[in-house]
């Protein structure tokens, strides 16, 4: 195992350098994020949701909106459920309510579906690959300067900042980048205090989102047995050399590229839109 300790600047009194950017693309954040040496993307304005009654895919109204344990209601009343869900089985792009025990252990692209509050056209979005998720979290230039844990009101999660932004070093803490048997991760040191120190009101983060294009990955829960609120999060990726994969977020660590050996999981989905290659 090799570990490298990295000094990471975290926003206290927020001070970023940025170019003002208007965004006329529905459902799309303005920030540009490298997912490889040659490709940038823009993130969706919230996690993917499915309205069972209306039979439409949509993005959450805000980045911090998650349903968490409300997803359990689908299991409690699978035949009569009429609500909204935001945790999905791996093969559920054609059938959002697919029971994880029925799902084929094979990726199916959610981004092919029209998104009701994001132009409502098919094939405009896609899911990041495992390697792309790892790159944007850990490998892009200055990656460790562009990521930090935060709380929006009461919702914990991980913030990513766009490629070309700099942070004044008002708060500094230590994170460890680890490589264990080829699975790279970020260990959060003193994470309990960091979620408190980096706390936003809804309006404060909305300003950061609009001015900078910041991305927030909320802890939306992970469905193994029963979903717990605001404890952790999992985000599907398109797969790696170990099969199905996901990005795991917890109070203690970030694992952008984790293998998934069971069909009995439901995770969040965060879609992206390609921009012109670098």
Image (cartoon, grey):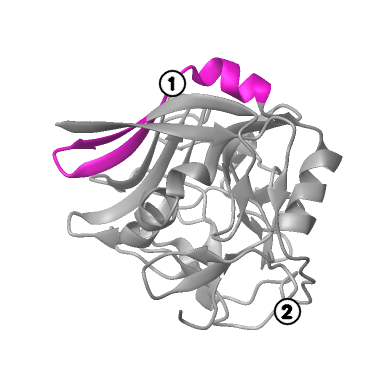
Q: Is residue 168 magenta?
A: no
Residue 103 in view: no
Question: In which quadrant will I find the N terminus?
Answer: top left
Instruction: Give SS at disc 2.
Output: loop
Tell me if residue 33 comes above or below residue 192 in the rendering: below
Q: Where is residue 125 drawn, in percent x and y?
A: 55, 74
Q: Residue at x 49, y 71 (%)?
A: 40
The reply to whether callout 2 and callout 1 are in contact (CB within 8 Å) is no
Q: Where is residue 137 drawn, in percent x and y?
A: 43, 49
Tag shown at residue 112: none
Q: Residue at x 26, y 44 (%)?
A: 262
Mark 2 vs mark 1: which is more N-terminal? 2
Q: Residue at x 32, y 38 (%)?
A: 185
Mark 2 crowdedness (10 Å alpha carbons): few <14, some 14-19, many ≥20: few
Q: Where is residue 12 drawn, in percent x and y?
A: 69, 30
Q: Which residue is mark 1?
A: 189
Residue nearer the viewer, 110 or 212: 212
Residue 203: which quarter of the image?
A: top right
Question: Marks 2 and 1, how far apart in space?
Answer: 41 Å
Lateral position of residue 153 relative to residue 144, left or right: right
Residue nearer the viewer, 261 or 248: 248
Tell me if residue 186 comes above or below residue 252 in the rendering: below
Instruction: Give SS at disc 1.
Output: loop
Mark 1 crowdedness (10 Å alpha carbons): few <14, some 14-19, many ≥20: some
Residue 15: which quarter of the image?
A: top right
Q: Which residues are magenta?
A: 176-197
Q: Where is residue 178 drawn, in percent x and y?
A: 26, 34
Q: Residue at x 40, y 57 (%)?
A: 140
Tell me if residue 252 comes above or below residue 39 in the rendering: above
Tag shown at residue 119: 2
Lateral position of residue 9 relative to residue 204, left or right: left
Q: Is residue 191 magenta?
A: yes
């Amino acid at each position: 195992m090799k570990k490298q300790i990295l000094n990471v600047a975290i926003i206290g009194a927020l001070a970023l350098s940025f170019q003002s950017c208007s965004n006329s693309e529905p459902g799309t954040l303005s920030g540009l994020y490298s997912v490889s040496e040659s490709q940038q993307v823009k993130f969706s304005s919230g996690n993917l949701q499915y309205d069972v009654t209306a039979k439409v895919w949509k993005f959450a109204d805000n980045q911090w909106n998650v349903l968490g344990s409300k997803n359990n209601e689908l299991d409690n009343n699978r035949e009569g459920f009429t609500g909204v869900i935001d945790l999905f089985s791996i093969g559920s792009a054609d059938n959002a309510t697919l029971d994880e025990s029925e799902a084929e252990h094979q990726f199916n692209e959610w981004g092919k579906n029209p998104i009701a509050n994001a132009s409502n056209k098919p094939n405009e979005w896609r899911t990041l690959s495992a390697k792309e998720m790892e790159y944007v979290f850990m490998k892009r230039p200055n990656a460790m300067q562009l990521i930090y844990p935060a709380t929006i009101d009461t919702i914990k999660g991980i913030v990513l900042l766009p490629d070309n932004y700099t942070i004044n070093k008002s708060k500094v803490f230590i994170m460890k980048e680890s490589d264990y048997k080829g699975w790279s991760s970020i260990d959060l040191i003193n994470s309990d205090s960091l979620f408190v120190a980096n706390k936003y009101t809804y309006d404060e983060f909305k300003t950061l989102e609009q001015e900078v294009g910041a991305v927030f990955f909320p802890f939306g829960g992970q469905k193994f047995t029963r979903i717990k609120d605001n404890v952790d999060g999992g985000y599907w990726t398109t797969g790696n050399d170990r099969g199905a994969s996901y990005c795991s977020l917890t109070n203690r660590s970030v694992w952008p590229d984790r293998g998934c050996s069971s069909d009995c999981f439901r995770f969040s989905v965060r879609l992206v839109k390609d921009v012109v290659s670098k």
